[in-house]
Amino acid sequence: MLNSMDDSRPIFVQIAEKIEDDIIEGELPEETQVPSTNQFAALYRINPATAAKGVNLLVDEGILYKKRGVGMFVKEGARVQLREKRKSQFYEQYVVAMVREAAKLGITTDQLTEMIRKGEQAE
Amino acid sequence: MSQVVYAKGLTKSYGGFDAVKDVSFALEENRIYGLLGRNGAGKTTIMNMITAQTFPTRGELKVFGEEPFENGRVLSRVCIVKESQKYPDYFSVRDVLETAAMLFPNWDRAFAASLVEEFRLPVKRKMKKLSRGMLSSVGIVVGLASRAPLTIFDEPYLGLDAVARKIFYDRLMEDYTEHPRTVVLSTHLIDEASPLLEHLLVIDGGRILLDEDADELRGRAYSVAGTASKVEAFASGREDQVIARETFGSLASATLLGVMDEGTRRQAGSLNLELASVSVQQLIVHLTQENTQRKAANDR
């Protein structure tokens, strides 16, 4: 209740992921300003130095850039870049786990494919 | 970055007992530190030495670059809020706040007034008539509104409910971002305070067990749980990483230092073990417990 962060993973990584999610979902369009470190600190009740580390991680990865005296902005092309990055993680994170669980439950590959189709229709 | 506290080989003995043994650390300006450890670990003794309430037996201690003892220049820049704070019998809440206003050069009256309102403190009431939670709230108001360059909170929230603790964390972070200062928070409520802390000092048996950035400890350990024989199979190749083990009949769990990478995930998956990441609080509990057990084994 008192905090929204997972205390078993580095918080700076979680901050970077939240910003990435907002960029991918279009909440933070390219060339718009990202909330300040202090705003992140207040919103998620975390240490500002940790929040800054998360923002800087995305600067290093070329997702954000700094406008002197103004703040951090989303770089042009950031959305495409992030989508590609997430796609490569998708296999390890979701597919491998799904296939393992399916095997445990005796779900065949055909049944699994069928389920994916069904899931698509429900969307 | 300049150092606010510098301790080298700091020791405090009471009779033949070393409450603090050969401790060395530095606190840098404008960071928020967590001073953590079990009861009797030596946290309060360290804080009492920093605030010149007790003399070190041996070692070097500098606060703002100077010896703290009977040093007005240093002590006017330090505020300590402690659970066991005593007040004169006839003091009301207002008397405490007025005294604090005189003692601390950076005191902010308006901020203090707004905190008094938020904590619903009766300013006219005598301190000795306050409930445990209200006493804690007065300490917190003093600690925050003093804006001392070095502010130390020693278990500040005895008797405070979750709402009041949330107010404390919120106001601390807000005010810290506007008026950065060095803060030391000693607490047992690691889970809820941990996101606010930049750096942790974990004390155990009078010594420093860990001196690291909090974020470095998140994701430092993981645990596996499942059938006892399979947990053993998983742990057998990693004996040096295991920091805790528990068995419940045919089930067991083990906590290991290390990163949960793809290899560990796969092996745990193939053994049908449940993998979980370990929070800072769990990690510190395991490490301080392990340390105690190892010491007991050595003494035997």
Image (cartoon, coloured by chain):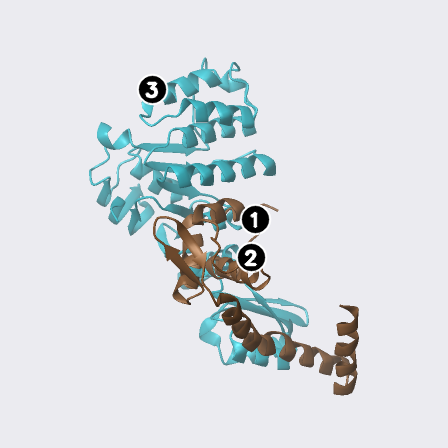
Chain colours: A brown, B cyan
Q: Subunit of mark 3? A: B
Residue highlighted by disc 1 = A3
**Do marks 2 and 1 both belong to one polypeptide chain?**
yes
Residue A6's label in the rendered image is: 2
User: What amino acid is labelled 3 in the image?
Assistant: Met
| CA gap, disc 2 and disc 1 | 8 Å
The residue nearer to you, when weighing B47 against A74, is A74
Residue drawn 52% across the image and 62% down it? A20
* Amino acid type, callout 1: Asn
Find disc 3 in the rendering and name its residue: B102
Residues at marks 1 and 3 on the same chain: no
SS at mark 1? Answer: loop
**Residue located at (38% from left, 56% from top):** A66
Distance in Å between CA atoms under marks 2 and 3: 42 Å
Foreground residue among B258 and A5: A5
Left or right of B260? Residue B4 is: left
Residue A44 lies, in percent from the top left, at: 53, 48
